[in-house]
Image (cartoon, rainbow, N blue to C red):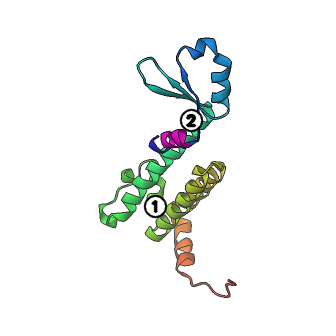
Amino acid sequence: MIVRMRRISESGPQVAYQATDLARHHRAVIDAARSGQALLRDKDGTALVLAPAADIDRTYEIAELALELIRARQAVDREAGQRSAGLYGDLAWLSVLPDEVQRRCLDELTEALLVASSGMSLRPVELLLGDWRATAEAWADPATREALAAEEAAPLVDAEL
C-alpha cells in the first residue's frame, strides 16, 4: 500500500474532498472515484481514498503474490536439508520441483508479476501459475519424475537461436 499511496499523491493535481462533500457534491466525489481515485479528508485530517473495488482487489492480489514469491524465494535459498514444504507458504507445491526448476519458476512468476503490476492484466500470471502447478504435479508423480529429470539434464541439440 505504500507504493499505491505514493502513486495517489504523485498522480498530479487532485481535489481533496471534505467529508461534507459526500452530502453536498456526492456526484463529483463518486465520479472522481470511478475515474480512479478520490481523496477524501475527514474532519480530523485523516486522508481516505475512494477507488473502484476492482483496483483495490488487484492491488491486494499483487501484494499477496509478491509476498508469497518472497517467502518461496527464501525457502529455495536455504540448504535443501533445511527446507520443508511449509516454508513455501501458499506455493508449497514448488517443493517437489528440483532446485533449478524452482528458481526458474520463481523468476518467471516474478517477471510476470512485475509486468502485471505496471497496469497489465493479472491473467498471464494466473495462467503461468496454473502451468507451473501442472509441472509440479508431473514432478510429484514417480512415474514421470525420472523422465522429466532426464529431460532437464539433456543438452540442447540443434537448437536455433
Mark 2 crowd level (few <14, some 14–19, many ≥20, 10 Å Cα): some
Q: Is residue 129 left or right of residue 84?
A: right
What residue is pinned by disc 1? 96
Classify mark 2: helix, strand or loop: helix
* Residue sitting at x 56%, y 60%: 111
Range drawn in magenta: 4-10
Query: Where residue 159 appears, x then y in whole percent?
Result: 67, 84
Secondary structure mostly seen in magenta is helix
Quadrant of residue 144 within the rendered picture: bottom right
Query: Where residue 50 appears, x then y in whole percent?
Result: 57, 28
Mark 1 crowd level (few <14, some 14–19, many ≥20, 10 Å Cα): some
Q: Is residue 83 magenta?
A: no
* Residue sitting at x 50%, y 61%: 106
Query: Where residue 132 appears, x then y in whole percent?
Result: 57, 58
Q: Is residue 45 left or right of residue 112?
A: left
Query: Where residue 51 appears, x then y in whole percent?
Result: 59, 31
Amino acid type for the residue under numbered disc 1 = Val
Q: Is residue 5 magenta?
A: yes
Q: Residue furthest bottom?
A: 158
Q: Earlier in the sequence, mark 1 or mark 2?
A: 2
Q: Pick whichever, 145 or 17, lies toward us.
A: 17
Q: Is residue 60 visible?
A: no
Q: Is residue 71 visible?
A: yes
